[in-house]
């Protein structure tokens, strides 16, 4: 199945000059969504993954489903102030300024084998920040999986020492 057929382009979103890859059209098609899940599960099976970590918010669409399918726990990564218990945080660079991501301090145990999942690999800043969070908590990053890799932005450079998978490349 050609998953690109289920991803639409929205020009000038969220600001002029940006071509946004919209996955909501993939999500409303049950066959495309199932195919995406099947591919993610196939990439993760047999690797001893104990936790799936996904970033807010679009990473939450597939992260919990992947975790269930491979019998792993799910850990949400959120923006500051969104998680109720004690957290650890990681700041990362944006095009203009910085942002911060957090996970619960007790979510990852030393030795956990972690799959990091998000919708899009763009500049790699978010993925790199989450790798740092996972490793600071004692986890081992097994792989990073994305629906889309915007290869022209070269985000893989920030996470190239890890196994990186994407279902669709632009």
Image (spheres, rainbow, N blue to C red):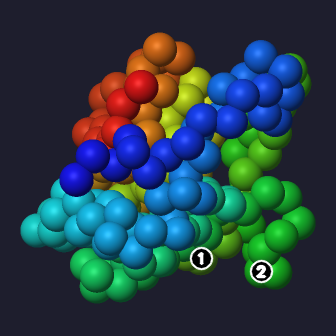
Q: Is residue 12 visible?
A: yes
Residue 89 pos. (x, y %)? 73, 53
Could you say where residue 97 lies in the image, as x and y percent from the top left? Answer: 87, 24
The residue lying at 22 percent from left, 53 percent from top is 1
Q: Is residue 124 visible?
A: no
Which residue is the site of mark 2?
85
Image spot of residue 82 (x, y percent): 83, 70
| Residue furthest to the left | 46
Q: 10 Å neighbourhood of mark 1: few (<14), some, or many (≥20)?
A: few
Q: Is residue 69 above or below residue 132?
A: below
Task: Give the residue pinned by disc 1.
Answer: 106
User: What residue lies at 47% left-to-right and 77% top-to-bottom?
Assistant: 64
The vertical placement of 50 against 157, above or below, is below
Cα–Cα span, label 2 and label 1: 9 Å
Report crowding for label 2: few under 14, some 14 to 19, many 20 or more residues within 10 A (C-alpha). few
Looking at this view, is 39 or 53 the one in front?
39
Q: Residue at x 49, y 46 (%)?
A: 7
Q: Assess whether mark 1 and mark 2 are in contact (beta carbons under 8 angstroms).
A: yes
- Side of 21 where 7 appears, left or right: left
């Amino acid at each position: 199945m050609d998953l690109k057929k289920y991803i639409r382009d929205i020009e000038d979103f969220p600001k002029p000059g940006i071509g946004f890859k919209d996955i909501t059209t993939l999500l409303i098609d049950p066959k495309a969504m199932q195919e995406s899940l099947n591919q993610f599960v196939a990439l993760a099976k047999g690797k001893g993954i104990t936790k799936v970590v996904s970033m807010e918010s679009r990473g939450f669409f597939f992260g919990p489903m992947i975790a269930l399918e491979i019998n792993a726990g799910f850990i949400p990564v959120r923006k500051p102030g969104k998680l109720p218990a004690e957290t650890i945080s990681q700041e990362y660079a944006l095009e203009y300024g910085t942002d911060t991501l957090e996970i619960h301090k007790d979510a990852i145990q030393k030795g956990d084998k972690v799959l990091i999942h998000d919708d899009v690999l763009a500049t790699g800043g978010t993925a790199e920040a989450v790798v740092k969070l996972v490793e600071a908590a004692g986890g081992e990053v097994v792989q990073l999986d994305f629906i889309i890799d915007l290869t022209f932005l070269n985000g893989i450079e920030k996470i190239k020492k890890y196994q990186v998978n994407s279902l669709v490349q632009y």
